[in-house]
Amino acid sequence: MKHGKKYNEAAKLVDRTTLYEPNDAIALVKKTATAKFDETIEVHIRTGCDGRHAEQQIRGAVVLPNGTGKTVRVLVFAKGDKVNEAEAAGADHVGGEELIPKIQNDGWLDFDVVVATPDMMGVVGRLGKVLGPKGLMPNPKAGTVTMDVAKAIADIKAGKIEYRLDKTNIVHVPVGKASFTEEALQENFNALMDAIVKARPSALKGQYLKSITLTSTMGPGVKVSTAKF
């Protein structure tokens, strides 16, 4: 894969054989984020889990203390009083049955997170083929199937992110933007890692966290020491 001049310059600052302490890795990732836009800082965690077994799945959500730096658009499926509650809490879109054809047929996807009250899951379930592959299906574990829609919306807007294993047993999550201070990124990273460590499946034998890599959207990956986790 050919990289541009900027990437190659940035890559020279990173020693690929070194496992950096989290604070040093964050400083380095900030330094190597040289794109003209505010790059997202992401964490990629390779686990020893086998996601094909339900008891080794990792899935949950965590509120990053300093948010993600991006505006999150929330769609809520609700009815009755919950519609007003969702609107008052700042949901970007609220609806029910009438949204199904809009999403299914018109390909409308102007939202980043979907929240649903439990009594609407029958309706939302019909969108499984569209929302599932995009990771947008509401899920009780992630707190997106709930009667407390106001709290769910507030958490999401405040910087709540979902984490889950992908097909290769890696968790990919954003922890902020390159414009964040090192302290803010460190706090977000710590909050995420605390949640990931607590989510260790009891069925897992052997090493849980195989590697942690921090990277910006366009920058090189920086390997983080897993020793303290």
Image (cartoon, rainbow, N blue to C red):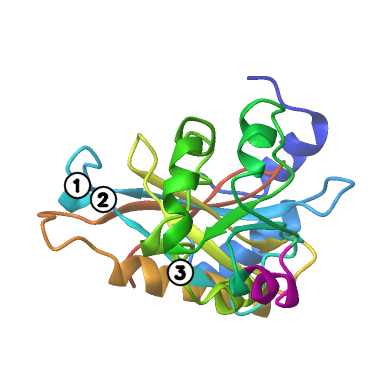
Q: What kind of secondary structure does the magenta stretch mostly adopt?
A: helix
Q: Is residue 172 visible?
A: yes
In the image, 156: left or right of 189?
right
Tell me if residue 43 is in the magenta stretch. Answer: no
Q: Which residue is mark 1?
A: 54
Q: Nearer the viewer, residue 24 or 63?
A: 63
Q: Are marks 1 and 2 in contact (CB under 8 Å)?
A: yes
Q: Residue at x 45, y 65 (%)?
A: 61
Identify which amino acid the numbered label 2 is placed on: Gln
Q: How many marks?
A: 3
Q: Secondary structure at mark 3?
A: loop
Q: Residue at x 34, y 73 (%)?
A: 228
Disc 3 from disc 1: Cα separation: 23 Å
Identify which amino acid the numbered label 3 is placed on: Thr
Q: Pick whichever of labels 3 and 2 is earlier in the sequence.
A: 2
Q: Residue at x 70, y 49 (%)?
A: 111
Q: Secondary structure at mark 1?
A: helix
Residue extent of the magenta highlight: 83-91
Q: Nearer the viewer, residue 59 or 24?
A: 59
Q: Residues within 10 Å of mark 1 (few under 14, many from 20)?
A: few
Q: Which residue is mark 2?
A: 57
Q: Nearer the viewer, residue 87 or 184?
A: 87
Q: Provide residue 87's location: percent of width, then percent of height.
A: 73, 70
Q: Which residue is mark 3?
A: 146
Q: Check the picture and name the quadrant holding the N terminus.
A: top right
Q: Nearer the viewer, residue 139 or 224?
A: 139
Q: Provide residue 21's location: percent of width, then percent of height.
A: 48, 68
Of tags 3 and 1, the one toward the viewer is 3
